[in-house]
Image (cartoon, rainbow, N blue to C red):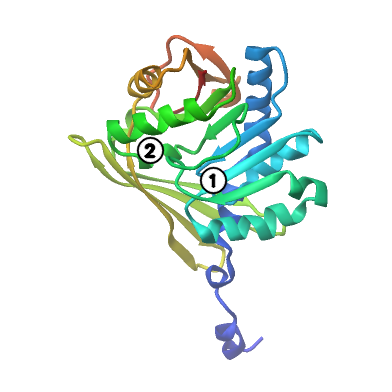
Amino acid sequence: MSSLEHRARPAMADLADRYRLYQLAVQNPRTEIDFVDRTFRQLRGRSARTLREDFCGTAAVCCEWVGRRKHNRAWGVDLDPEALAWGRRHNLGALDASGQARIALVQADVGAVETPSPDIVLAMNCSYWLLGDRRRLLRYFTRVRDSLAEGGIFFLDAFGGYDTFRLLTEERRVRDPQGGSFTYVWEQAVYEPVTGRLVCHIHFRFGDGSEWPRAFSYDWRLWTLPEIRELLTDAGFSRVMVYWQGWDSQCKPDGVFVPVETGEPDAGWIAYLTAEK
């Protein structure tokens, strides 16, 4: 290949699909629904059938849910028309006609949306941290409680640890099932101690040296577990539980989350929460 032909080749970053990369690097719908499905059954003694995914993005979790049982239904709610359109084309489009018919994607504010009352509402990937003051977050939690079916459960996640309060960049190599790999970069660019403001970016880097800086950016409030639990209780949930991740023999997170009353002061941790109506 001549040097001119080499220069004419498009950069990998120019050909990349940021939603696809995000799903490969960040999301694991199967593991998430494993936890949600199992935990609901443990707490309620039956399987859930209906689920609403708030801040759903491309609705990968909705698609995983309807694939579990033929009677499962899901609603995905997000304000971003681009992410919803991508999800319809790539995620819903990969389902059969029955699966597609059992998912409704709604472009709306999660704080004002009206849907049928589901057994489960999800707010994962710390998406609710976009609600940066107590009044707004309490109002959202209250609306979620009111929208749930009787006996319904609200599932959330959170992260923390002493590394959360500093500026840092972390990199992880991700294998692409279609061949090759790319580097996922998590950057905590701003932390403001007085307000709790946390600004984070996701960057992608590729084998040819090209990169997609700030493919996704988040302007959040860093909510702590005590604050989240207190707000959920104030919103009227009858019981709030925290599920902590354990460690394997190599001292790496084992992906198993169990209910706890106390956790460890690690540099970085991830937890699930349940709030029962």
Residue type of the residue flagged with mark 2: Trp
User: Residue 33's image quarter?
Assistant: top right
The nearer-to-camera label among 2 and 1 is: 1
Label 2 with label 1: CB-CB less than 8 Å: no
CA gap, disc 2 and disc 1: 16 Å
Q: For the N terminus, which image quadrant?
A: bottom right
- Read off the residue under disc 1: 77
The residue lying furthest to the top in this view is 261
- Between 116 and 99, which is closer to the camera in this rendering? 116
User: Residue 20's image quarter?
Assistant: bottom right
Look at 64% across and 39% down and name the residue there.
29
- Read off the residue under disc 2: 129
Residue 129 visible, this orientation: yes
Q: Secondary structure at mark 2?
A: helix
Q: Is residue 99 above or below residue 231?
A: below
**Image coords of residue 228 (percent x, y):** 37, 24
Look at 45% across and 9% down and name the residue there.
261
Q: Secondary structure at mark 1?
A: strand
